Image (tube, coloured by chain):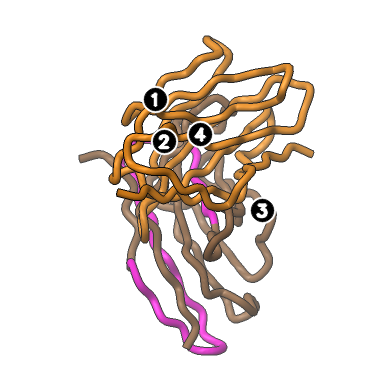
Amino acid sequence: AQSVTQLGSHVSVSEGALVLLRCNYSSSVPPYLFWYVQYPNQGLQLLLKYTSAATLVKGINGFEAEFKKSETSFHLTKPSAHMSDAAEYFCAVRYAGNMLTFGGGTRLMVKP
Amino acid sequence: DGGITQSPKYLFRKEGQNVTLSCEQNLNHDAMYWYRQDPGQGLRLIYYSQIVNDFQKGDIAEGYSVSREKKESFPLTVTSAQKNPTAFYLCASSITWSSGNTIYFGEGSWLTVV
């Protein structure tokens, strides 16, 4: 069965520091991978997605993620955190013929 | 503007009562989904529909029911059989059911049992 693991349910960074949110998926078959962001009491907004076109994917708000098949990872990064980045981030994986499966989420806190 | 509209935003249910959450999309998407989110947890799939007049159970369908009579509408009924319905419910849609398509989400509805 497909699964996705987000390491760290809470991550705290200082404003201006590097953001690194970790995501690992389980399968030898290349999946479709997604990162979503959720602000309090709101729905999910797509940050970026990987569909095998390029291993380094750039998304909105300065975020990017790199697909590493050898590590089965799709970590999300941003060079410089902003206060407005504070939110819950979800990694999700989907394989052909299957449904979207979400990780448990990582809450990002940004300290001034 | 195109998007997914969920209503109501907040809903309170009494014990033994059925309630229906509305979901409407004007994106002309074929596929629609309902997810449940519990505080501090990820999303779990309740039901999905690939096309009008068809729907399938997801991972946690017990105590829920849906209909898909129109392409733009996918209401979710939380029945009295759902023993722990307090949660945040998210409706979503995608162009088709194909795996590479982006799934877009509505703003969500809070359901609380009183």
Label 4 belongs to which residue?
A: A20
Q: What residue span does the magenta drawing correspond to?
A: B9-35
Q: Which residue is drawn at 34% across and 46% down?
A: B25
Residue of label 1: A59
- The reply to whether label 2 and label 3 mark residues of one chain is no
* Position of residue A31 in the picture relative to residue B5 (left or right): right
Residue at x-position 69% and y-position 20% = A30
Q: Contact (CB < 8 A) between labels 2 and 3?
A: no
* Label 3 crowd (10 A; few <14 / some 14-19 / many >=20): some
The alpha-carbon separation of the residues under discs 4 and 2 comes to 17 Å
Alpha carbon of mark 3 to alpha carbon of mark 1: how far?
A: 32 Å
Dot 3 lies on which element? strand
Residue where numbered disc 3 is placed: B57
Question: Disc 1 or disc 2, which is closer to the eye?
Answer: 1
Do discs 4 and 2 belong to a common subunit?
yes
- The residue mark sitting in front, 2 or 3, is 2
- Front-most of B30 and A49? A49
* Residue located beneath label 2 in the image: A46
Name the residue: 63% across, 75% down: B82
Mark 4 burial class by Cα count in 10 Å: few <14, some 14-19, many 20+: some
Judging from the image, mark 2 belongs to the subunit labelled: A
